[in-house]
Amino acid sequence: MCGIVGYIGKEQAAPILLEGLSRLEYRGYDSAGVAVFDAGTGSLAVRKAKGRLQVLSDQLHGGADLDSTVGVGHTRWATHGAPSDVNSHPQVSRSGRIAVVHNGIIENYAELKAFLTAQGVPFTSETDTEVVAQLIEYFYQGDLLAAVGRVLHRIQGAYALGILCADCPGQIVAVRKDSPLILGYGEGCNFIASDVTAILRHTRRVGYMEDGELAVLTREGIRCYNHLMQPIEKETVTVDWEIDAAEKGGYEHFMFKEIMEQPDALRRCLSPRIREGEIVFEDFSLDEEYIRSMRRIYIVACGSSYHVGMVGKYHLERLTRIPVEVALGSEFRYMAPIVDEHTLVIVISQSGETLDTMAALREARRLGGHILSIVNVVGSSIARESDQVLYTWAGPEIAVATTKAYTTQLALLSLLALWLARQLGTVPEEDCRAMLAAFQELPGKMEEVLSRRDDIQYFASQYFNHDSIFFIGRNLDYALGLEGSLKLKEISYIHSEAYASGELKHGTISLIEDGTLVVALSTYEVLFAKAMSNVVEVKARGASVLALATAPHREEMARTADSVMTIPEIHALLLPVLGVVPLQLFAYYVALMRGCDIDKPRNLAKSVTVE
Ligand code: AGP
């Protein structure tokens, strides 16, 4: 995600843009930039810088260096092109007369870039956004709105755009599709912003742009159009949020906001990579000869990213029949790992800065492994030191307890497993198509789970006073339990353990006594009967059981368990992606009821850059 601000009025634009961007840094903070119209030269003044917004603000002396009353600004969360000055927004057209700020992903930017390059258009950045600026200029013949309209027929993907043109400095053009964009209505001035936080100091009267809509902002007003370029009347509302609440999108905590963002994060992560039944990894390639030479896969990570690897092992081995080892970053170096040039090493990290994981990456490279990382932060250390990188595009994750990064990592690793299986021909094509269909329905099914979050809140109210909780499950459900247990521990401070259900009788069941809470995970269809027997086993020793099952098994489970959480059915490949959401919510509500500091749990950091 990135942050966009635009202003047109009578006051100095740059300070307003910089202040607005400072309210959006939670959306992205690896680089920032502004473009204003310089009446003195009749051209655009574009200033941008890698690093936090403060770097840019210091360079511009708080905006005092730019004399202008119209401009657009951007704070970036890199998706295409590592953080750098040249990849920062605004991106400009070849003449420098058109500047664009963008939040989202242009899915077909590569083909459009190839087309424009063939027309002799020079490109300076690695971004998908520059294609938009160049394409607007390609179509521009004096009417900016008309040129933008022609571009919208050609770009695919998610985009919120703010567009400034030196030929018509009395206006800003805005466009919205799948990425939020708000219109701010002031007195003699008007605004665009990614969310209300950026403009709340100047106006509380806002309009929410809908997908496909365009807007032309002038000092006198805002004209809106639908996707057919027909003028429309925009409803406005008065915002009564305080700024702090708005940064969290109205949610009480970043963690809850990020839990709720997961369907959109999955869409950002998956939709550019699944097209007409094909899996398209634009930013990644492994040739078939190498894939067939692979003798082993190592997955290396820490914490929740390690739990992604635990699920990934089941999927990769089942689909590709290649042996998979999963190792903790902190253990890998000391286990004399068997790695050579025929070993694919998958390194998973949200931050891309976890030192234990980085150390493991370097050891794996020393041993000759081929390093593929799955990372959220573009241009992070682990990404830079990998041979190949698959970015999750989940957007910045602020809460220490990972949620949307976890589910997008897991979905991406599952997609990679399917892609490898297809390359190797180890899975019948009809099964591949069934799994691809499951990816398409995943965000919608997750929204269904999220819509029933009140059920989870009720269960949390029943169990938040327990001081020891067990998560049990088999196979995929065991790996799911590891993550559910960690989520609970790290934000509620309740001791919890995840156990392979079949292992209980080998010792741990001695701990089960009257009232012990057992969260029994039974989503994996083929092992449901076994899961049921384990529920009976712990109930017989006095446990309280909170089960997680797919909807068709609710009644049967409810006959034995004390409470049942459910998820819709989905292909087994994606059960852990869907199944983790009730566990995230359970941990969140339990921590809330225990009065814990949810976004910043004690003793923890978002990125562990120490050994
Ligand atoms: C997860 O909620 C924790 N914050 C922690 O386990 C985290 O997953 C771990 O530190 C690894 O971080 P990374 O994914 O950024 O490498």
Image (cartoon, rainbow, N blue to C red):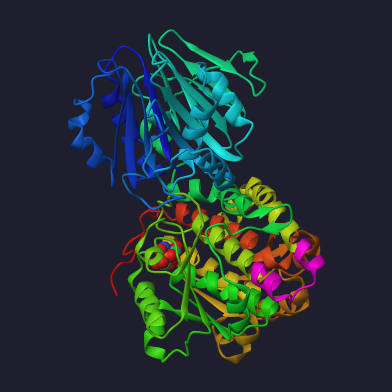
In depth, the one of 60 and 40 nearer the eye is 40
Image quarter where ligand 1 lies: bottom left
* Residue 331 placement (x, y as % from top left): 40, 83
Residue at 40 percent of width and 57 percent of height: 400
Does residue 429 belong to the magenta stretch?
yes
Q: Quadrant of the C terminus?
A: bottom left
The spot of residue 311 in percent (x, y) is 59, 72
Q: Is residue 42 left or right of residue 501?
A: left
Is residue 188 one of those drawn in magenta? no
Residue 423 location, quadrant: bottom right
Q: Nearer the viewer, residue 320 or 106?
A: 106
Q: Nearer the viewer, residue 209 or 342?
A: 342
In the displayed structure, does residue 23 sit left or right of residue 259? left
Q: Is residue 40 above or below residue 502?
A: above
Give the camera-side residue of 237 and 498. Answer: 237
Q: Position of residue 31 (x, y in %)?
A: 33, 44
Residue lying at 37% horizontally and 83% vertically, measured from the top left: 366
Observer able to see residue 250 = no
Count of marks overlaid on the render:
0
Instruction: Judge whether residue 192 can be spotted in this image.
Output: yes
Q: Quadrant of residue 96?
A: top left
Magenta region: 418-434
Q: Is residue 116 left or right of residue 50?
A: right
Whether 91 is drawn above or below 428: the answer is above
Prevailing secondary structure class for the magenta stretch in the rendered image: helix
Which percent across, then down, holds residue 65? 19, 26
Residue at 46% in and 44% down = 1
Q: Is residue 532 above or below residue 73?
A: below
Residue positioned 41% across, 17% down in the render:
167
